[in-house]
Amino acid sequence: MGAVVSDPNGLTWAATLVPLAVTIPTAGHAVIFFEVMKGLTALSVSLAMFAFSPNRFAYFHYHIRGISP
């Protein structure tokens, strides 16, 4: 058997949980934020292309519906 290490306050497990309690939500937030930003970037580019398109109706049919002009 291994050596038994005594913990005078019994709080070693709590000191281990605190960093995990901070790290896990932070990592999840970073992933969600990254996915939202990717979606917003794609939406922004699409809206900009539509806004500056000389013929918005043709843009809709060609890019959105897949119909050639």
Image: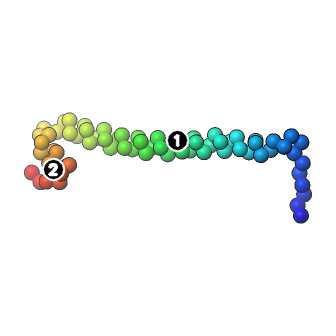
- Estimate the x, y position of residue 21 in percent, counting from the top left: 65, 42
- Disc 1/disc 2 C-alpha distance (Å): 37 Å
Q: Secondary structure at mark 1?
A: helix
Q: Measuring 62% from the left and 43% from the top, which residue is drawn there?
A: 23
- Mark 1, Cα crowd under 10 Å, few <14 / some 14-19 / many 20+, is few
Query: Decide: marks 1, 2 in contact (CB < 8 A)?
Result: no
- Which residue, given by chain and number where applicable, does mark 2 sit on? 62
Q: Measuring 89% from the left and 42% from the top, which residue is drawn there?
A: 8
- Which residue, given by chain and number where applicable, does mark 1 sit on? 29
Q: Measuring 68% from the left and 42% from the top, which residue is drawn there?
A: 19
- Amino acid type of the residue tagged 2 in the rendering: Tyr
Comparing 32 with 34, the one in front is 32
Comparing 19 with 49, the one in front is 19
Given the current orientation, which residue lies at the most extreme bottom position? Answer: 1
- Estimate the x, y position of residue 68 in percent, counting from the top left: 12, 54
Q: Nearer the viewer, mark 1 or mark 2?
A: 1
- Estimate the x, y position of residue 37 in percent, counting from the top left: 41, 41
- Amino acid type of the residue tagged 1 in the rendering: His
In this rendering, position of residue 26 left or right of residue 59:
right
Above or below — where is 25 with respect to 65? above
Q: Quadrant of residue 15?
A: top right
- Mark 2, Cα crowd under 10 Å, few <14 / some 14-19 / many 20+, is few
